[in-house]
Amino acid sequence: MKKTLLLFIGLSFLISCTNDDSPSEVDSDQNPVDFFPQNYIGTSGQLKKMKWTMGDGTPNSNWYFSYNGNKLDKKTSYNPINTIVYYDFQYQYTNDLISEVYISNVLSEELNYDNQNRLIERVGIDYKDEYEYLTNGIRWIRSTLDSNNNYVLNGDNLLIVDSNNQILEIKNYSNNTSVGIYEYDDKIAPMRNILGLNKLLSNFNQDDSIFNNITKQIDPLSGSNLLTINYEYLNQKPIKATYSNSSGIYLTIDLEYY
């Protein structure tokens, strides 16, 4: 399914929304505001802030993170000029597993697990993902709601993961054709020790990376890199990520830690 090549959908969606659909457009002629939300807490080494800047130097958004011990409590994205909120995520846990995700206090996603604490279902507002654990990978079936509010099959794929549950490859389930290959560095991902994230089978951005940092998204049908990420590190953790595609650099993310 070609759509799986857009597994950086969180990244592309947020860039699109914060530039096109936000309450107030970011004005590149203004100076970004450096602030930190009240009641946001974390412990030493946890990801505190991400500053997104487009390839042309235009400020895109500032993300801030708060924790309850080793559990992600909330994260908020702000317009970096006037501090208007773009997105406000809250996380609810059942034991050490993320069971509900809210956006601005409205339930956005429910997650269900089997008796081995493996993700088997995630239900969003207009979609449902189901996971089946096979000997050769994890079958991932996505259904979306149609205009009659019925679920319609939207994709059927096989996820190949490593021992850390990081996705290495995505294949079309019906014909075993590879549609996406992913490579990682050997350094420490910003969210490595945050509980629950390593179960979600979504480890493509800095704020959901679970062990190492993704460096390439490859289209095996063309043999080309759809996306390349280069990092600057401090103490084995990324402090800057530079995203490039065939047109050049289109995004940089600066990272700060508690």
Image: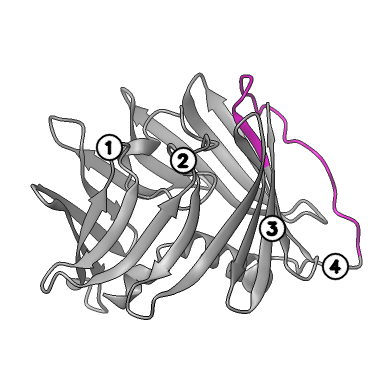
Mark 4 touches mark 1? (CB < 8 Å): no
Residue type at numbered disc 3: Thr
Query: Distance between the Cα atoms at labels 4 and 2?
Result: 33 Å
**Residue that sits furthest to the left in the current view:** 135
**Residue drawn at 33 percent across, 24 percent down:** 96
Q: Could you say which is closer to the camera, residue 150 or residue 123?
A: 123
Query: For the C terminus, which image quadrant?
Result: top right
> Pointer 2: what residue?
212
Mark 3 touches mark 2? (CB < 8 Å): no
Lower sequence index among marks 3 and 2 = 2
Question: Which residues are drawn in magenta?
Answer: 30-49
Q: Is residue 235 above or below residue 164?
A: above
Q: Position of residue 112 (x, y in %)?
A: 22, 41
Lower sequence index among marks 4 and 3 = 4
Q: Please rate how many residues cluster around mark 4, counting C-alpha atoms within 10 Å: few if below 14, some from 14 to 19, many from 20.
A: few
Mark 2 touches mark 1? (CB < 8 Å): no
For residue 28, the mark is 4
Mark 4 touches mark 3? (CB < 8 Å): no
Q: Position of residue 128 (x, y in %)?
A: 24, 59
> Pointer 1: what residue?
163
